Image (cartoon, rainbow, N blue to C red):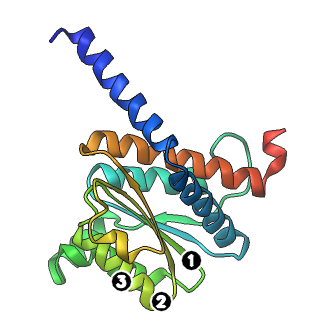
């Protein structure tokens, strides 16, 4: 396959993933609920916590920094933190096991009224699963951005948005699109002056 054909094929697949997602009204209803949960959390003075592994961890960090920093225009910072800083991960992994890295940090920092968003292309990441269980114990609402069939996290989340794709790259591309869009939708509610 020629390099140009690889580019065309990849971009077409990405476009098809978006089109497929848009063709399912239930998915858009879940996205609207995601907006409501995030907006309610910030308006009530709660914080957002995010987590994931590998590329999903990078997306979780990106989500948090768009909120504590800024998205498109100036506005006050919103409380958000990606769980899993390096010193915490190495400490907890050494003392308790890698599967506890997110749950233990959330148990220490999270409060009822906060929101946890977990990203997992398989839906079966043990450390994200344990974080969702810890969230439930503390009265923290949860949103899972998933792929494939949703895995075990689908049933644990208050809201699960599952990308109907089989490859991690397509799933993660959709996750980042959902992240950017929920930030915009939340900002439009909280900071309408930024969108005039």
Q: Earlier in the sequence, mark 3 or mark 2?
A: 3
Q: Which mark is residue 114?
A: 1
Please say if the residues under marks 1 and 2 sit with CB atoms less than 8 Å apart: yes
Q: Residue at x 26, y 72 (%)?
A: 127
Q: Residue at x 27, y 65 (%)?
A: 151
Occupied quadrant, residue 7: top left
Q: Earlier in the sequence, mark 1 or mark 2?
A: 1
Residue 26 visible, this angle: yes
Residue at numbered disc 3: 133
Q: Position of residue 11 (x, y in %)?
A: 36, 23
For residue 105, above or below residue 189: below
Q: Residue furthest bottom?
A: 137
Residue at numbered disc 2: 138
Task: Judge the density around disc 2: few (<14), some (14-19), many (≥20) Cα neighbours within 10 Å.
Answer: some
Instruction: Say which quadrant the C terminus sits in.
Output: top right
Q: Could you give the CA–CA distance between mark 1 and mark 2, rounded to whole angstroms?
A: 9 Å
Residue 88 visible, this angle: no
Secondary-structure class at tag 2:
helix
């Amino acid at each position: 396959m020629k390099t140009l054909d690889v580019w065309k094929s990849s971009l077409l697949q990405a476009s098809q993933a978006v089109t497929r997602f848009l063709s399912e009204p239930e998915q858009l209803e879940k996205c609207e609920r995601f907006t409501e949960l995030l907006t309610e959390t910030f308006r009530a003075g709660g914080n957002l916590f995010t987590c994931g592994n590998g590329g999903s961890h990078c997306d979780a960090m990106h989500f948090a920094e768009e909120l504590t920093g800024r998205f498109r225009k100036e506005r006050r910072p919103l409380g958000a933190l990606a769980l899993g800083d390096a010193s915490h991960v190495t400490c907890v992994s050494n003392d308790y096991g890698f599967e506890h890295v997110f749950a233990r940090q959330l148990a220490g920092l999270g409060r009822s009224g906060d929101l946890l968003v977990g990203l997992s292309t398989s839906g079966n990441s043990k450390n994200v699963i344990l974080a969702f269980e810890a969230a439930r114990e503390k009265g923290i609402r949860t949103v899972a951005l998933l792929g494939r069939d949703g895995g075990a996290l689908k049933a644990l989340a208050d809201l699960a948005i599952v990308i109907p794709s089989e490859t991690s790259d397509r799933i993660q591309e959709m996750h980042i699109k959902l992240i950017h869009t929920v930030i915009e939708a939340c900002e439009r509610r909280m900071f309408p002056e930024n969108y005039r």
